[in-house]
Image (tube, coloured by chain):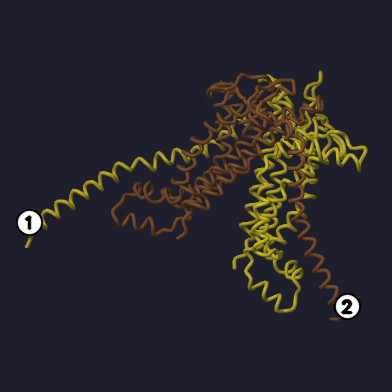
Amino acid sequence: MLTRQDTAKEIHFQQLAERHKRRVARERWLPVGLFLLTLLSVITTIGIVVVLFSETISFFQRVPIIEFFTGTVLKPLSQTPQFGVLPLLLGTVLSTAIAMVVAVPLGLMTAIYLSEYASARWRKFLKPALELLAGIPTIVYGFFAFTFVTPVLREWIPSLQATNLLSPGIVMGIMIIPMIASLSEDAMRSVPNALRDGAFGLGATKLEVTRKVVIPAALSGIIASVVLGISRAIGETMIVTIASGSSKNFTLNITESMQTMTAYIVEVTGGDASAGTTVYYSLYAVAMTLFVFTLAMNMLARYISNRFKEEY
Amino acid sequence: MVTRGYFRYRMITNQFARFAFLAASLFGLLVLFVLLYRVIEQGAGWLNSGFLTGRLSTQPDQAGIKGAVFGTLWLMAVVIPLTTMVGVGTAIYLEMYAKKGKLRGLIQTNIANLAGVPSIVYGILGMTLFVRALDFGNIVLAGGLTMSLLVLPIVIVSSQEAIRAIPSFLGEASYGLGATKWQTIKSVLLPVALPSMLTGSILALSRAIGETAPLVVIGIPALLLPIPMNIFDKFTVLPMQIYYWTIDSSLLAEYANLAAATIIVLLTILFLLNATAIIIRNKFEQRF
């Protein structure tokens, strides 16, 4: 039997339920609005691809695609312009290679030290300090390469030009150390201790455990970190722009000035190439090449770390 | 075959390796130290109130970076609201509303790929789209929109991580009290996630402050510009100033000192931002 109080409660609950329903109904548009915000990142990708692709096609209507990818001479501003991308590709590959020669051993050794050797306290100090190194803007590294590293290197290598590929390559490597170190360390630390203990129990030294247990177990993560480092070096702009100059040499001599793809883009845009000229379109062809390269590297890194991930 | 000699060899290489690994990890710190020392030694003498409040000049001893400081501030005035709104909104959609499936995976992969696109490519997008197609010219708004696109993936990912780190019982308790989804997000989840979202945004912001390449592509001239007063003015920023003074230092050596002084200002700003982020993280982050 319902009392008067119960009826009042009933009515109150009904009101609340009504209000809740109204609120839910009003909220229905929310996911739609949020979805539109989410679409912005998809639109950005489409924007990049469309812009690069359409202008690159305009470029290839003026310069044959074969000439672009096989030409060893890049003279965009001469009377008889030539648009071979190989000097830029070589510059990018060489500077990336120098950076990796520096960053891979130092980054991996740092990762090993942090993950296997360092005490908790020491690690707590070292890691943020390395993050500081990673947080320094690339323009500052460019300044450092140009005004410090090059003059110092010239003491040892007198033939080194004022702008050269060696110095920015080394500085780029130093810039990438924290990235490789931190990603590899994550991979090594996720190797379970049981594996290490097993090897220690068999009488292995710490170095042997690191070399024969930890590194093989963390290999996919380590390789992925190196691939990401390569991608970062390929896309790095300011260091090479400042310290490597703008000579479009096609040479293996890293003591000379050479230009990378990124530095070429800076030079052409900074020179205010008027829209519609072949030089202007060449910008997009180079950027497209750069974009494809870095995208491929990033996807490769993700594939490696997903495909060969060891689950424990 | 186990001999004593082999045992000793193993022990010695072990010790040697330990030393080598330590040396390698200290190398990074050494470079950091040399870099900071060099910059401070070169630039500290040029840092004075005249330098901070003066306008650009071709005369090194009269040049100041007021314009660049204002440009950086105006740029942030565009980047902060835009990236926060879109970044947090996207993170809420992906974590709270999107159904786990192909579309969500695709968007997530897309964001990860965007984070790996070189900054100079964003510069080309901004130059083509904002500066030329929409005909903004090289004003603060064009630079700010470009920078926003560049750091957006970072903000999205860090906001997602912040939401994911919230224990599910908080949301469930809120639903149990009859709150709707949006009420739960607005009044329960976002306040909890705020500190780590803020930390992520600040770190993204410091990336935008130090980034140079996209702005070079957009075409910030090395001219003596008036101080920007709103987002529709032409502008320059601290990193651009460092860039021009560094490449001009082969003409006049003093320009390198100006670049070094500007670097000190830039690094100080970045340091303060990062310190703020760390303080926020340590002070307000709740553990469950």
Q: The disc labelled 1 sits on which kind of residue?
A: Arg
- Label 2 CA crowd tier, 10 Å (few <14, some 14–19, many 20+): few
Provide residue B137's location: percent of width, then percent of height.
59, 21
Is A120 left or right of B195, judged from the image as shown?
A: right
Please identify the quarter of the rendering in which residue A184 is found.
Answer: bottom right
Quadrant containing the N terminus of chain B in the rendered view: bottom right
Is A54 left or right of B168, judged from the image as shown?
A: right
| Above or below, A148 relative to B220 | below
| Above or below, B194 relative to B84 | below
- Numbered disc 2: what chain? B
Q: Nearer the viewer, residue A307 or B94?
A: B94
Circle 2 is placed at which residue position? Answer: B5
Please identify the quarter of the rendering in which residue A240 is found.
Answer: top right
Q: CA distance from mark 2 to mark 1?
A: 97 Å
Provide residue B259's location: percent of width, then percent of height.
73, 31
Q: Residue at x 41, y 58 (%)?
A: B168
Q: Nearer the viewer, residue B279 or B174?
A: B279
Circle 1 is placed at which residue position? Answer: A4
Q: The disc labelled 2 sits on which kind of residue?
A: Gly
- Label 1 CA crowd tier, 10 Å (few <14, some 14–19, many 20+): few
Quadrant containing the C terminus of chain B in the rendered view: bottom left
Q: Is residue A261 visible?
A: yes
- The hue of chain B in the figure is brown
- The hue of chain A in the figure is yellow
Q: Nearer the viewer, residue A105 or B283?
A: B283
Q: Is residue A55 visible?
A: no
Q: SS for tag 1?
A: helix
